[in-house]
Image (cartoon, helix red, strand yellow):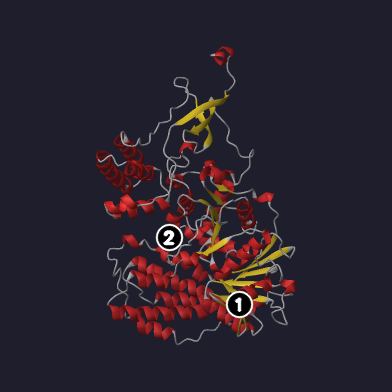
Amino acid sequence: MATLHGWRGALLVEAVGSGKTWLALAVAVCERGPVLAVVPAILRAQWADAAARAGVRLHLWTHERASRGSLPSIRPSLVIIDEAHRFRDPATRRAHTIAPWIVGRRTLLLTATPIVNRLADLITLLRLIVPEDALALDGIPRLGDVEFAASPPRALRRIAIRSPVRACPTIDRRITLLQPTTVELHRSERAVAAIHHLALSTCAPIRRLLTSVLLDAAASSDAAFHRTLQRYRGLLLQARDAGGASRAMLRRFAGESLEQMVFWSLLPNPDNPGDLPLADIPRVEALLLAIPNDALWIGELISHCTGRRPTICFTRHRATARVIRMTLGEGTAWITGTEAGIGPHRMPREMLLSAFGPNRGAWQARKQVPEILIATDVAAEGLDLKAAGRIVHVDLPWTATRLEQREGRLLRLGQHHADVEVLVRLPGPAIEAALAPQARVQRKRGLADRWLQALEVDDVAGMPVLAGPLVTASATAANNVGEFTILLERDGRTGVSAIEQSVTGDLGCAIAGAARTAISRCSTHDGGSRILVNRIHRLARLAASRRDGPGLHHLDRLLRFAAASPTIGMRLIVARLVDGGDRELLRADVPDVAAPGAISATCIAAILPAMASAEIQS
């Protein structure tokens, strides 16, 4: 609550299953105005149920609607964004839709996994809710500088909130690594040899991308590999008819999690980044003649799922999910994309998932409650499936984040079992050597764990040892934007470092000087802000010559917006204003932002090392 009050934005990064939904609803209880939650579509019913139980009136919107460019009509005073890591890429349409809309609104982001692939993911989430210079008083001029920090800055605790893991009840995990059998060894070797026999592309990055897609499918199952070969054949035929493969075609083939392996902007030709070898068509057709055979490894996998402990099997590939449920028979529950059911019978997703949720004991949709659920990663985020006591990773996901999200469906407060069994099916050595899925997941998990542990709020443990004389000062912005406690080194000559003062526009008489100050302030931002400030300066001189008071007031508001340290949403708004004409600029309605003002520092304490009494008196 204090972070939301001071920054108008907060990032809640509590561990998976620790109750972030209820913490967010507790914030919403104290809100006077409307509250909107932006959640994945599959979690909408769960959020509605939780809000009803908490007695909170909550408006709901979905990530999927934002991805289609649709925004709600209400004007909420608080926005809650669940599974916020889905907005870690500012180039996505959902980020382009939501980021400008939340400017000026208090926003609470919820995610247990803010770092998916790299530190830039966390920085993007911070840039959604706070300006670029939010941590300037802590010695971090730009949020982007966090990416180059040798260790996680403690200043991030001002915005990102996380309790110590030891403060939360933990659930024991019994992890079993399922080594590949002899049959699996041979299967993986054949798949790797077949992929290496394909030419794939004359462009090295594209060849690596296509190789990774095929290897990833082969690691999952013969069925997934067969389906991916069919898709590759379709891509080749489409490229033959179109005279080449476009980036859009390749990105659709790779999927969201794998297409990020290529720096597309570095490829020379956006329309035809690399010709696909049509000689691969007969080679692929020969490989498709082989009949997929996954029964052996599925039988071996299920043999480890003994007893009547409800089990959830996660896989990345729909083809793998389908072959498992077909092998196990009609009593197997399954969920893929927007469809769900038990055996051949379709069933609403919410009804099926409740069989593995907290109310499993009261489930009466069928005579027999299902014991095994086969799920793709559509069910890996946010769902409460704590009635299940066993999770099986049929294949390894592309990131450690997805692995943690999967296990978080079971490893959560209120788990029905004393412990949770975790079975991990490892890929064959040939695939591990070529794709390294296990090593990749461990590397990304290590990075995320190190930074998240540094964010844990612990008032005493881990405080740095202070060396040298220091002055503790309370710094307050002149416009009452917020208060900070900072440490300033005393150098014996100038005392504490001076903080540069910024001024705002004075309508009608000093707006030109304010524009020059704004240009100086936004020099550390992007070129769009400088262009916009120059245009405002020109229009302000014209308005002043006409003695247009309302026009000057409007331009002063635009000036404050353009000169302020930007969030991602503010950058997008500025870019839109720059692209428009002067008429659109004079009619533009921008959110109110805090005006840059003076910052005063007051000494409230001094920390001095032991020294002579005369020096202390001095």
User: In this rendering, does residue 468 appear at all?
Assistant: no
Q: CA distance from mark 1 to mark 2?
A: 29 Å
Mark with earlier residue (1, 2):
2
- For residue 301, side relative to residue 531 (left or right): right
Q: Residue at x 44, y 56 (%)?
A: 101
**Residue 212 is drawn in which quadrant?**
bottom left
- Most foreground residue, 68 or 419: 68
**Residue 113 is drawn in which quadrant?**
bottom right
- For residue 185, side relative to residue 51 (left or right): left
> What residue would you read off at disc 2?
97
**Disc 1 residue crowd, few under 14, some 14–19, many 20+, Cα 10 Å:** few
Count of numbered circles in the view: 2
- For residue 34, side relative to residue 54 (left or right): left
Looking at the image, the residue that sits furthest to the top is 614
Secondary structure state at the residue bearing disc 1:
loop
Q: Position of residue 436 (x, y in %)?
A: 49, 65
Residue type, numbered disc 2: Thr
Q: Position of residue 348 (x, y in %)?
A: 60, 77
- Most foreground residue, 375 or 133: 133
Vertical side of 525 occupied by 204: above or below: below
Q: Residue at x 41, y 74 (%)?
A: 196
> What residue would you read off at disc 1?
348
Q: Position of residue 38 (x, y in %)?
A: 53, 61
Secondary structure state at the residue bearing disc 2:
helix
**Disc 2 residue crowd, few under 14, some 14–19, many 20+, Cα 10 Å:** many
- For residue 573, side relative to residue 371 (left or right): left
Q: Position of residue 536 (x, y in %)?
A: 30, 44
Residue type, numbered disc 1: Pro
User: In this rendering, does residue 578 appear at all?
Assistant: yes
- Most foreground residue, 443 or 256: 256
**Residue 45 is drawn in which quadrant?**
bottom right
